[in-house]
Amino acid sequence: MGVTEYTIKLKAEAQRLGFLSCGISEAGFLEEEAPRFEKWLKEDRHAKMGYMANHFDKRLDPTLLVPGAKSVISLLFNYYTEAEPQDPEAPKIAKYAYGTDYHLVLKDKLKTLFQFLQTEIGDLNGRVFVDSAPVLEKAWAAKSGLGWVGKNTNLIAKSTGSFFFITEIICDAEFDYDGPTTDHCGSCTACIDACPTEALTPYQMDASKCISYLTIELKDQIPTEFQDKMDQWAFGCDVCQTVCPWNRFAQTHQEPAFEPRQELLDYSAKDWEELTRETFDVIFKNSAVKRAGFDRFKQTIGFLS
């Protein structure tokens, strides 16, 4: 069986497993991305996420993560839902964290896909990645034509918007490679204009002002300058995606594991203020919200009130 046949089988199996789309690039050093990433770090736009500066070379060259790597397979998985909290005053959680932690769900699907490739190809070495290693996932997805990195710094696809996870398989097999698409943000500045904390400039995000950073990554107290700018977000933020015109094409996901627990939609602002550790552990069992932890989550809710 030839490279083209393997490529067709790979993409068909990815679709069967529920992935939104699959694109493939030849593994190698990301020459165009290197100066941009270095500049972003030097300007301290990663705020206190010190880990972003670690493994600089590995982030730019997948062959250092998987010796002998020939291909980077990028896969998108939809998590969009129209479900919203019923109480407009209640603290909000980003849509990606409504259901079971995506790391758990998608790693299983990627392993299944990798095993399929091993069965088809035979001698195959590689690794699967779900936010689990220094991989510049948006750069690789864009390089393989799955979308473009927009002014909100998210990957955007014309047909599906941006409410999706980006995952990878890096392996030592060759496939037919895809090429990049073009930028379709045009003169639109909806995301920049809507950002509650003014964290965005075109194609740049200052993490120190981003609500997702402030509610998830930041280990210190949220600075008081953001007291009235959080737009009731307690974990993550969807504003720059929600206002993006391309997300009018987003379709509701079909993954049962990503369905929200009913409490996330039914709880009032008062219910969240009275949340106990025991209830937190039940509601957010196997949830990405556990990453923040009960104390931090409650602290953020207090900051919003």
Image (cartoon, rainbow, N blue to C red):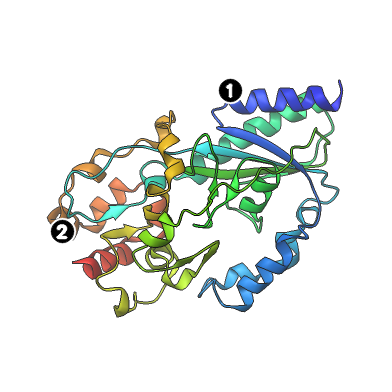
SS class of the residue under badge 2? loop
Classify mark 2: residues with Cα within 10 Å, few (<14), some (14-19) or many (20+): few
Q: Is residue 286 among what the camera can see?
A: no
Residue 116 lies in quadrant: top right
Structural crowding at the residue carrying mark 1, measured as other residues with C-alpha within 10 Å and reported as few (<14), some (14–19) or many (≥20) = few
Name the residue carrying label 1: 16
Spatial CA span between label 1 and label 2: 43 Å
Residue at x-position 22% and y-position 68%: 302
Q: Which mark is residue 297?
A: none
Give the residue at the far left of this rendering: 270
Q: Position of residue 199 (x, y in %)?
A: 43, 68
Quick one: 82 or 283, which is closer to the camera? Answer: 82
Residue 32 in picture, x, y percent from top left: 74, 60
Q: Which residue is mark 2?
A: 274
Which residue sits at x=43%, y=44%? Answer: 245
Q: Is residue 58 above or below residue 109?
A: below
Callout 2 amino acid: Glu
Closer to us: mark 1 or mark 2? 1
